[in-house]
Image (spheres, helix red, strand yellow):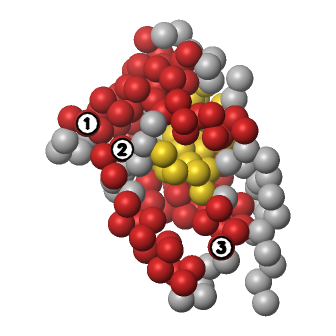
Amino acid sequence: MKKITIYCGSRKGDNTIYEAGARALAQEMIKRNHSLVYGAGRVGLMGVIADEMLGAGKEVLGIIPQKLVDREVAHDGCTELIIVETMRDRKWLMAERGDAFIAMPGGIGTLEELFEIMTLNQLHYIQKPLALYNVNGYYDKLIDFLNHAMKEGFMYPEQEELLIVSDDPSDLLDQIEAYEARRPSDWG
């Protein structure tokens, strides 16, 4: 069993395919006996995946800053709920507690978390699999941009190779489970 940290939207998006994708990913995690680490929200895709996991009796660890608890967005059904002081504390604890990371569709918070994990992997603070769950081609333009950054000499090819991308939950988890840490080139 792996503890999978999921980054995703506090909104569901305007297309029902994103909610269906969250449910499909949760069902695949349930089938493989994985647990969920996430930002403890009860709203948006965060709430969808947490509810799906909890409904199957799986462990759900939610980590949330007090400020968001005060705004009444915390999921009170989490198996374990950790309340922290800041968003920075939340992100670091989510990085520590997870064995692997998946970025589902989401907004700027999801993107920030995705890039933070990419950076932590690049700098060898952690060496854990990171995946984009590319539901409905959501991340296609971001992938294009990362390829552009690599072609322009701002990213090493190994950095892109460390990012797992799939729109299929089974394939995504297969790749995560097969992941072997590789040391990307040092910059110079």
Q: Are marks 3 and 1 in contact (CB under 8 Å)?
A: no
Residue at position x 60%, y 57% from top?
Answer: 163
Mark 2 or mark 1: which comes first in sequence? 1
Q: What element carries label 3?
A: helix
Q: Mark 2 points at which residue?
A: 135
Q: Which of marks 3 and 1 is in front?
A: 3
Please state the horizontal and vertical placement of residue 99, each as a whole percent of the image. Answer: 71, 39
Image position of 179 (left or right of 90) = right
Q: Are marks 2 and 1 in contact (CB under 8 Å)?
A: yes
Q: In the rendered view of the protein, which quadrant contains the N terminus?
A: top right
Tag shown at residue 102: none
Q: How crowded is mark 1: few (under 14 residues within 10 Å), some or many (20 or more)?
A: few
| Three-letter residue code for mark 2 | Val
Please state the horizontal and vertical placement of residue 167, each as a whole percent of the image. Answer: 42, 42
Q: Can residue 166 be seen in this view?
A: yes
Q: What element carries label 1?
A: helix
Tag shown at residue 17: 1
